[in-house]
Image: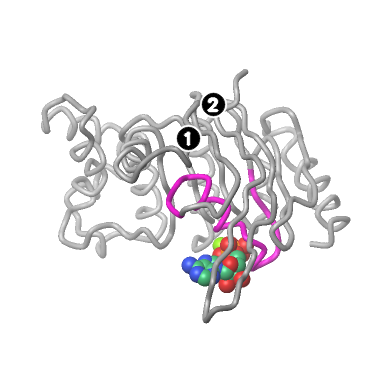
Amino acid sequence: MSKVIEVKDLCKTYVVNKKQNNVLKNVNFSIEEGEMVAIMGPSGSGKSTLLYTVSGMDKMTSGEVTFNEKKLSKLNDDQMAEVRLDEMGFIFQQMYMMKNLSILDNIILPAVKSKKNTESRKDTEIRGRKMMKKLGIEDTADNDINEVSGGQLQRACICRSMINNPKVIFADEPTGALNRTSSDEVMNELVGLNNEGTTVMLVTHDVKVAAKCMRTIYIVDGNIQGEYDFGTRATSEDIRMRERSLSNWLMEMGW
Ligand SMILES: Nc1ncnc2c1ncn2[C@@H]1O[C@H](COP(=O)(O)OP(=O)(O)OP(=O)(O)O)[C@@H](O)[C@H]1O
Ligand SMILES: [Mg+2]
């Protein structure tokens, strides 16, 4: 297996009202291709910041992130935008869909914008509809974004994150606003994509979500405090046991 993400001595400092806030302090870890990794930790510990800096959405203060063999610090803004469009998928709650576009048009937007995409708009639409069908939301294709449920919107976000066949999907609390049933549905889709080869890095507060990942990285106050590695994918037989053992470990971590 090869490393798709390698993070070396990553630091991120925000300056607010002339006061420095060192949010990430020399963070080191890597993610292998095909892994599904959860980031957990207390509120304010830097989980979202870690996701934003690793995915190039936010600039790092120092250190290096190597993504798919590219050093992010060496890329200019245009190059970074291309990598983000073509090689990364995003499921971030605050990245709302465009209000003036239908669900389907929102889903295919990254493909329409990508310079690498040579297919016709019609073919892209067909591909978009296929994905919607797979995730059980094909009936919402022509709806406005305020005409679908939270769970449907989140599944539409997954379709959008996948439309350019990214190497890695980054998700910040993808199930955070959902009830247990919708959360399970969304996680099943992410696990399915991961089984098909897409690497997933997600932030969650939910042990049930993390137990479905192969590995959990626990972050406190901008430092990695520990890692829990199942080393395998979850099965329906071992999922309860995984939830219990992860939960016990998290308690030891002070969660
Ligand atoms: N854009 C920003 N400007 C200034 N400070 C920020 C910014 N984003 C985050 N911070 C600060 O960085 C710290 C970590 O925030 P972050 O959002 O990464 O936490 P988190 O672990 O994701 O928390 P939560 O579980 O509540 O989502 C906090 O102290 C926050 O106030
Ligand atoms: Mg957060």
Q: Residue pushed farthest bottom?
A: 17
Answer few, some or many: residues within 10 Å of disc 1's Cα (few below 14, many 20 plus, some between 14 and 19): many
Answer few, some or many: residues within 10 Å of disc 2's Cα (few below 14, many 20 plus, some between 14 and 19): some
The label on residue 168 is: 1
Q: Relative to 107, is 115 above or below?
A: above
The label on residue 195 is: 2
162 falls in the magenta region: no
Give percent across and percent down for residue 3.
60, 26
- Residue at x 76%, y 36% (from the top left corner): 229
Ligand 1 in which quarter: bottom right
Q: Identify the amino acid type marked 2.
A: Asn
Give percent across and percent down for residue 25.
69, 56
Give percent across and percent down for residue 156.
34, 48
| Secondary structure beneath label 2 | helix
State the quadrant of the C terminus. Answer: bottom right
Q: Nearer the viewer, residue 247 or 7?
A: 7
Does 98 sit left or right of 201 as displayed? left
53 falls in the magenta region: yes
The label on residue 99 is: none
Does 118 sit left or right of 78 as displayed? left
In three-dimensional space, the C-alpha distance between marks 2 and 1, rounded to whole angstroms, equals: 13 Å
State the quadrant of the N terminus. Answer: top right
Q: Identify the amino acid type marked 1.
A: Val
- Residue at x 24%, y 30% (from the top left corner): 127
Q: Relative to 213, is 150 above or below?
A: below
Does 248 sit left or right of 94 as displayed? right
What segment is highlighted magenta in the picture?
A: 38-58
